[in-house]
Image (cartoon, rainbow, N blue to C red):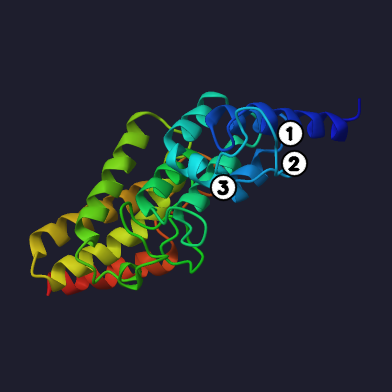
Amino acid sequence: CSQDRYKEVARLFADAELTHGSPAHTLALAFSGQAQSALKHGRALFNPQTVGGSGAGQPPRATLLTQWRANLAGLVANRMGGWQGLVTDLGDRLCSADDGLCDAHAAQCAYLVAGQPIEFYRAARRLALLGLDPRHCRQHCLFSAPEVVQAMRMSEIWEWVLARTENENSPNFTLALQPLKVEYAMWLTDMGMVPEAARYAQELRARCDAAKPQKPSKGRKQQAERPATPFLPPWAEAALSIFEDRLNK
Protein backbone atom coordinates (compact mmCIF):
# COMPACT_ATOMS: atom_id res chain seq x y z
CA CYS A 1 0.00 0.00 0.00
CA SER A 2 1.06 3.61 -0.35
CA GLN A 3 2.79 5.50 2.43
CA ASP A 4 -0.23 7.71 3.00
CA ARG A 5 -2.50 4.67 3.27
CA TYR A 6 -0.11 3.03 5.73
CA LYS A 7 -0.12 6.14 7.90
CA GLU A 8 -3.91 6.28 7.85
CA VAL A 9 -4.24 2.62 8.86
CA ALA A 10 -1.62 3.01 11.61
CA ARG A 11 -3.47 6.03 12.92
CA LEU A 12 -6.85 4.31 12.88
CA PHE A 13 -5.41 1.32 14.73
CA ALA A 14 -3.69 3.47 17.35
CA ASP A 15 -6.81 5.55 17.93
CA ALA A 16 -9.03 2.47 18.22
CA GLU A 17 -6.85 0.20 20.33
CA LEU A 18 -4.60 2.45 22.42
CA THR A 19 -5.39 5.10 25.00
CA HIS A 20 -5.00 8.49 23.40
CA GLY A 21 -2.01 10.33 24.81
CA SER A 22 -0.50 7.23 26.39
CA PRO A 23 3.16 6.36 25.68
CA ALA A 24 2.07 3.40 23.52
CA HIS A 25 -0.23 5.63 21.46
CA THR A 26 2.47 8.29 21.09
CA LEU A 27 5.09 5.76 20.00
CA ALA A 28 2.73 4.06 17.55
CA LEU A 29 2.20 7.41 15.87
CA ALA A 30 5.88 8.32 16.11
CA PHE A 31 6.98 5.18 14.28
CA SER A 32 4.52 5.98 11.49
CA GLY A 33 5.68 9.59 11.31
CA GLN A 34 2.56 11.17 12.81
CA ALA A 35 3.43 11.91 16.42
CA GLN A 36 4.02 15.62 15.91
CA SER A 37 0.34 16.44 15.54
CA ALA A 38 -0.53 14.24 18.52
CA LEU A 39 2.05 15.96 20.72
CA LYS A 40 1.05 19.43 19.62
CA HIS A 41 -2.70 18.96 19.79
CA GLY A 42 -3.36 15.70 21.63
CA ARG A 43 -6.24 14.58 19.44
CA ALA A 44 -6.88 12.10 16.66
CA LEU A 45 -6.68 13.24 13.05
CA PHE A 46 -8.67 10.65 11.16
CA ASN A 47 -11.17 9.36 13.69
CA PRO A 48 -11.59 11.70 16.68
CA GLN A 49 -14.78 9.96 17.83
CA THR A 50 -13.33 6.45 17.98
CA VAL A 51 -15.86 3.86 19.06
CA GLY A 52 -14.61 0.78 20.87
CA GLY A 53 -11.10 -0.09 21.94
CA SER A 54 -9.19 1.19 24.91
CA GLY A 55 -8.88 4.63 23.32
CA ALA A 56 -12.60 5.36 23.42
CA GLY A 57 -13.72 8.08 25.75
CA GLN A 58 -10.23 8.91 26.97
CA PRO A 59 -9.29 12.60 27.24
CA PRO A 60 -6.09 12.74 25.11
CA ARG A 61 -4.91 16.05 26.50
CA ALA A 62 -5.11 14.88 30.10
CA THR A 63 -3.46 11.54 29.37
CA LEU A 64 -0.67 13.02 27.29
CA LEU A 65 0.24 15.68 29.82
CA THR A 66 -0.28 13.78 33.06
CA GLN A 67 1.88 10.97 31.65
CA TRP A 68 4.48 13.31 30.23
CA ARG A 69 7.33 11.56 32.02
CA ALA A 70 6.46 8.21 30.45
CA ASN A 71 5.91 9.82 27.04
CA LEU A 72 9.27 11.57 27.30
CA ALA A 73 11.02 8.37 28.37
CA GLY A 74 9.44 6.46 25.49
CA LEU A 75 10.60 8.97 22.89
CA VAL A 76 14.13 9.05 24.30
CA ALA A 77 14.38 5.26 24.54
CA ASN A 78 13.14 4.80 20.95
CA ARG A 79 15.05 7.50 19.10
CA MET A 80 13.33 7.46 15.75
CA GLY A 81 14.06 10.08 13.13
CA GLY A 82 13.18 13.56 14.34
CA TRP A 83 12.79 12.49 17.97
CA GLN A 84 14.37 15.70 19.27
CA GLY A 85 11.74 17.76 17.48
CA LEU A 86 9.01 15.59 19.00
CA VAL A 87 10.46 16.05 22.48
CA THR A 88 10.59 19.81 21.88
CA ASP A 89 6.92 19.75 20.84
CA LEU A 90 6.10 17.90 24.06
CA GLY A 91 7.90 20.62 26.00
CA ASP A 92 5.88 23.29 24.20
CA ARG A 93 2.65 21.56 25.21
CA LEU A 94 3.78 21.26 28.81
CA CYS A 95 4.63 24.96 28.93
CA SER A 96 1.49 26.15 27.17
CA ALA A 97 -1.04 28.03 29.25
CA ASP A 98 -3.78 27.51 26.66
CA ASP A 99 -3.95 23.73 26.25
CA GLY A 100 -1.08 22.49 28.40
CA LEU A 101 -0.02 22.24 32.03
CA CYS A 102 1.70 25.64 32.13
CA ASP A 103 4.52 23.81 33.91
CA ALA A 104 7.82 25.48 33.03
CA HIS A 105 9.90 23.00 35.00
CA ALA A 106 8.38 20.00 33.22
CA ALA A 107 8.86 21.73 29.87
CA GLN A 108 12.51 22.42 30.68
CA CYS A 109 13.10 18.72 31.31
CA ALA A 110 11.97 18.06 27.75
CA TYR A 111 13.97 20.97 26.32
CA LEU A 112 17.16 19.82 28.04
CA VAL A 113 16.74 16.27 26.72
CA ALA A 114 16.14 17.66 23.23
CA GLY A 115 19.31 19.74 23.43
CA GLN A 116 17.62 23.13 23.23
CA PRO A 117 20.11 25.97 23.78
CA ILE A 118 19.80 28.79 26.29
CA GLU A 119 18.23 31.81 24.58
CA PHE A 120 17.91 34.34 27.37
CA TYR A 121 17.98 37.35 25.04
CA ARG A 122 15.40 36.14 22.53
CA ALA A 123 11.76 37.08 22.92
CA ALA A 124 10.55 33.69 21.64
CA ARG A 125 12.89 31.73 23.88
CA ARG A 126 12.15 28.25 25.14
CA LEU A 127 14.99 27.92 27.62
CA ALA A 128 16.49 30.76 29.64
CA LEU A 129 18.21 29.80 32.87
CA LEU A 130 17.12 26.55 34.49
CA GLY A 131 14.16 27.07 36.76
CA LEU A 132 13.13 30.44 35.32
CA ASP A 133 9.89 30.93 33.42
CA PRO A 134 10.32 34.03 31.24
CA ARG A 135 7.27 33.13 29.14
CA HIS A 136 4.83 33.61 31.98
CA CYS A 137 6.78 35.66 34.52
CA ARG A 138 7.93 39.03 33.27
CA GLN A 139 10.34 39.45 36.18
CA HIS A 140 12.24 36.35 35.05
CA CYS A 141 13.26 38.22 31.90
CA LEU A 142 15.50 40.41 34.06
CA PHE A 143 18.40 39.69 36.37
CA SER A 144 16.57 41.42 39.20
CA ALA A 145 14.53 38.32 40.04
CA PRO A 146 15.61 36.69 43.32
CA GLU A 147 15.32 33.28 41.64
CA VAL A 148 18.25 34.14 39.35
CA VAL A 149 20.86 33.01 41.89
CA GLN A 150 19.47 29.49 42.14
CA ALA A 151 18.76 29.39 38.40
CA MET A 152 22.36 30.27 37.57
CA ARG A 153 23.66 27.62 39.96
CA MET A 154 21.41 24.95 38.45
CA SER A 155 22.47 25.99 34.94
CA GLU A 156 26.13 25.74 35.91
CA ILE A 157 25.54 22.29 37.39
CA TRP A 158 23.97 21.19 34.11
CA GLU A 159 26.90 22.71 32.21
CA TRP A 160 29.28 20.69 34.39
CA VAL A 161 27.30 17.47 33.81
CA LEU A 162 27.30 17.95 30.03
CA ALA A 163 31.03 18.62 30.00
CA ARG A 164 31.87 15.59 32.14
CA THR A 165 29.73 13.24 30.06
CA GLU A 166 31.05 14.63 26.75
CA ASN A 167 27.48 15.27 25.65
CA GLU A 168 27.06 16.49 22.07
CA ASN A 169 25.00 19.44 23.35
CA SER A 170 27.72 20.60 25.74
CA PRO A 171 29.47 23.17 23.46
CA ASN A 172 26.25 24.95 22.49
CA PHE A 173 24.97 25.08 26.06
CA THR A 174 28.32 26.28 27.41
CA LEU A 175 28.76 29.05 24.84
CA ALA A 176 25.20 30.28 25.34
CA LEU A 177 25.64 30.43 29.12
CA GLN A 178 28.83 32.51 29.23
CA PRO A 179 27.35 35.95 28.34
CA LEU A 180 24.86 35.43 31.15
CA LYS A 181 27.76 34.84 33.54
CA VAL A 182 29.10 38.29 32.66
CA GLU A 183 25.78 39.88 33.56
CA TYR A 184 25.50 37.68 36.62
CA ALA A 185 28.92 38.84 37.84
CA MET A 186 27.84 42.46 37.44
CA TRP A 187 24.67 41.73 39.36
CA LEU A 188 26.69 40.11 42.17
CA THR A 189 28.78 43.27 42.42
CA ASP A 190 25.66 45.39 42.71
CA MET A 191 24.53 43.11 45.54
CA GLY A 192 27.85 43.65 47.35
CA MET A 193 29.28 40.18 46.62
CA VAL A 194 32.48 41.49 45.05
CA PRO A 195 34.77 38.47 45.74
CA GLU A 196 32.29 36.09 44.07
CA ALA A 197 31.95 38.46 41.11
CA ALA A 198 35.74 38.71 40.78
CA ARG A 199 36.04 34.92 40.61
CA TYR A 200 33.55 34.85 37.76
CA ALA A 201 35.47 37.56 35.92
CA GLN A 202 38.80 35.76 36.38
CA GLU A 203 37.42 32.46 35.14
CA LEU A 204 35.75 34.04 32.12
CA ARG A 205 38.91 35.93 31.18
CA ALA A 206 41.05 32.80 31.48
CA ARG A 207 38.67 30.81 29.29
CA CYS A 208 38.45 33.63 26.75
CA ASP A 209 42.24 33.75 26.47
CA ALA A 210 42.46 29.97 26.19
CA ALA A 211 39.95 29.95 23.32
CA LYS A 212 41.93 32.43 21.24
CA PRO A 213 44.22 30.99 18.54
CA GLN A 214 47.86 30.79 19.60
CA LYS A 215 50.49 32.65 17.58
CA PRO A 216 52.97 30.32 15.85
CA SER A 217 56.46 30.24 17.29
CA LYS A 218 59.38 31.66 15.34
CA GLY A 219 60.73 29.47 12.57
CA ARG A 220 57.44 27.65 12.08
CA LYS A 221 55.08 28.28 9.25
CA GLN A 222 51.57 29.10 10.27
CA GLN A 223 49.25 26.30 9.27
CA ALA A 224 45.87 27.09 7.80
CA GLU A 225 43.33 26.32 10.48
CA ARG A 226 39.70 27.02 11.04
CA PRO A 227 39.17 30.17 13.06
CA ALA A 228 38.52 29.30 16.68
CA THR A 229 35.02 29.87 18.01
CA PRO A 230 35.20 32.81 20.44
CA PHE A 231 34.34 31.90 24.01
CA LEU A 232 32.33 35.11 24.33
CA PRO A 233 30.58 37.14 21.62
CA PRO A 234 32.32 40.49 21.00
CA TRP A 235 29.77 42.53 22.93
CA ALA A 236 30.05 40.26 25.97
CA GLU A 237 33.85 40.32 25.93
CA ALA A 238 33.75 44.11 25.72
CA ALA A 239 31.37 44.16 28.69
CA LEU A 240 33.75 41.85 30.57
CA SER A 241 36.66 44.23 29.94
CA ILE A 242 34.65 47.18 31.25
CA PHE A 243 33.64 45.14 34.28
CA GLU A 244 37.26 44.17 34.98
CA ASP A 245 38.24 47.85 34.92
CA ARG A 246 35.44 48.51 37.37
CA LEU A 247 36.72 45.81 39.72
CA ASN A 248 40.30 47.09 39.57
CA LYS A 249 39.41 50.63 40.57
Disc 1 is placed on an element classified as: helix
Residue 206 lies, in percent from the top left, at 27, 51
Residue at position x 53%, y 41% in the image:
87
Residue 214 lies, in percent from the top left, at 41, 46
Q: Are marks 1 and 2 in contact (CB under 8 Å)?
A: yes
Q: Is residue 186 above or below residue 64?
A: below
Q: Which amino acid does the dot numbered 1 rest on?
A: Arg
Residue 84 lies, in percent from the top left, at 57, 39
| Image-based side of 57 in relation to 197, left or right | right
| Image-based side of 69 in relation to 196, left or right | right
Which residue does the numbered mark 3 point to in the structure image?
89
Question: Mark 3 to mark 1: distance in Å?
Answer: 19 Å
Which of the two residues, 178 or 149, is positioned nearer the viewer here?
Answer: 149
Which residue does the numbered mark 2 point to in the structure image?
47
Q: Residues within 10 Å of mark 1 (few under 14, many from 20)?
A: many
Query: Which residue of the protein is positioned furthest toward the right in this rendering?
Result: 1
Residue 196 lies, in percent from the top left, at 12, 58
Which residue does the numbered mark 1 point to in the structure image?
11
Residue 3: name its quadrant: top right
